[in-house]
Image (cartoon, rainbow, N blue to C red):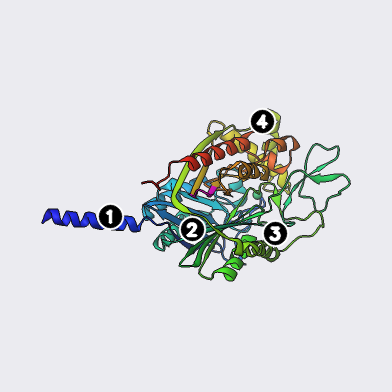
Amino acid sequence: MRFLSLFASAALLTASHSAAGEFRVGAAEVDITPPPGTPMAGYYAFRAVGGVLDPIFAKAIVMEQDGVHAALVVLDLSGTTRTIVEAARRAVQAQCGIEGDHVMISATHTHTGPQLARGSLMDDITRANSPEGKIYMQRLPDFVAQAVKEAKMKLAPAQPKVALGRAEGISFNRRVLRDGVAEAVWQPKKIDLAKERPAGPVDPEVGVMVFEAGGQPVAGYLNFAMHPTSVGGGVKISADFPGVFCRLVRERHGPGMVCLFANGCCGNINHGDYFSGRRRTTQELGTRLADAATAVWPLLQPVKPRVPRIRSEQVTLQRRSFSEAQIAKAKDIASRMMTEKLGTVPMAEAVCILETVAKKDVPLLAEVQVISLSDDVAVVALPGEIFVELGLAIKKASPFKHTFIAELANGSIGYVPNREAFPQGNYEVVSARGDIGSGEKLVEVALRLLKEVKDEPGSASR
Ligand SMILES: [Zn+2]
């Protein structure tokens, strides 16, 4: 009798195992709009939430096959911090049974979201550790776990489809070179084409990955590289253009869909149109991106899913070094920046220098992560504001047909310029934590992990 019941449960296990052999997807979103008084991110100043233009979310897509789970999570926040990511991964592991390093947590980089403490002078400037700020940070990991849990509960057999669209003329390389001047001009309103030119390219690609269950889209993972600064400050919460983009794609293509926006390598990419001198609205930017997705919707190609393959590696980067004179100047600026208006660039530089001095014996760690769901598709996570040249290099050399990149993922080391940008100085360079070559090192690791995942012996023959 005992043998019989053993046999029966073995048969059941086999049956449930073969049913689990399908690729399954679920998606969910949780409102993470902070209450009034919560400190806000962006612009090197203190702002407390005083209203809501549109709500912000923690959104999750969970994939599973043969018991292997992977989760793509995007937060409508200015960035992720390592502390919050580690807490969120622990919460996901405890509440959902998904291994922490199978979870990718990126931020859209909205500049009208709450601020998370980063362990630098920025925390004083933005009052990130105020009682309201602390309450928000304490709740965030559970919000992430809740989104992942709800997504996991909705797991259903799904077909991934991918198309790459293009949005031309809405993103601009915000660093400009002027004849005879070594330093790059930062975010000019209008350029003088006779003597000025963009310092680098843009990435006009709009990545669209859609998961269909029962013939209906249930989740979308949208990818484009551009700073979400179009609301332009103020004290009202907004997801900025990614909110409009996601909302329109859902309205047009699948009302039951959860749409995530992963920001690509937009460290030096913004929407200020210095050719025409005009500034596009949040609505306009989101609509242009949604139009780019809609244009390729009929071209969405099914890709063959398989058991998710995940790689994650902590890379140790070299911190920058500063002279005594630079450190003294940074201290002087820091002593005056709470009471005087000093400008973004000197403040960013002082914050970076003093953080580097304080953490000189702490390794500068950067997690590079790859999640692949098909022999044709992989998502790369990089922990900072990565220059577009580095993202383009990954896409170009990737062994995958479709490579999505999520920046500000799994923590942030701030701006990551490419090697060529360092001598050109200005905002992103003076505030970079990693030394020259850090970006290229991240590219090298990302490409190695992509190759490892691509070459991993498949489970198809099992
Ligand atoms: Zn930024």
Residue placed most toward the observer, 441 or 327: 441
Picture quarter with the N terminus: bottom left
| Dots 4, 1 in contact, CB < 8 A | no
The residue nearer to you, when weighing 276 against 51, is 276
User: Crowding at label 3, few (<14), some or many (≥20) Cα neighbours within 10 Å?
Assistant: few
Q: Which residue is mark 2?
A: 60
**Residue density around tag 1, few if under 14, some if 14–19, many if 20 or more, within 10 Å:** few
- Magenta stretch, residue numbers: 373-379
Q: Looking at the rendered structure, which numbered label has been put on residue 322?
A: 4
Q: Is residue 218 left or right of residue 125?
A: left
Task: Answer above or below: position of 334 versus 322.
Answer: below
Name the spot of residue 321 as percent of width and height, x first. 64, 30
Per the image, is 377 magenta?
Answer: yes
Q: Give the secondary structure at mark 3.
A: loop
Q: Amino acid at mark 2?
A: Ala
Tell me which label, 4 or 1, sits earlier in the chain: 1
Q: Which residue is mark 3?
A: 232
In whole angstroms, how far apart are the C-alphas of marks 1 and 3? Answer: 56 Å
Question: What is the spatial separation of the Cα atoms under label 2 and label 3, in whole angstroms?
Answer: 27 Å
Q: How far, Cα to Cα, is label 3 from label 4?
A: 32 Å
* Residue 125 image offset from top left, x and y in percent: 62, 49
Q: Residue at x 56, y 43 (%)?
A: 399
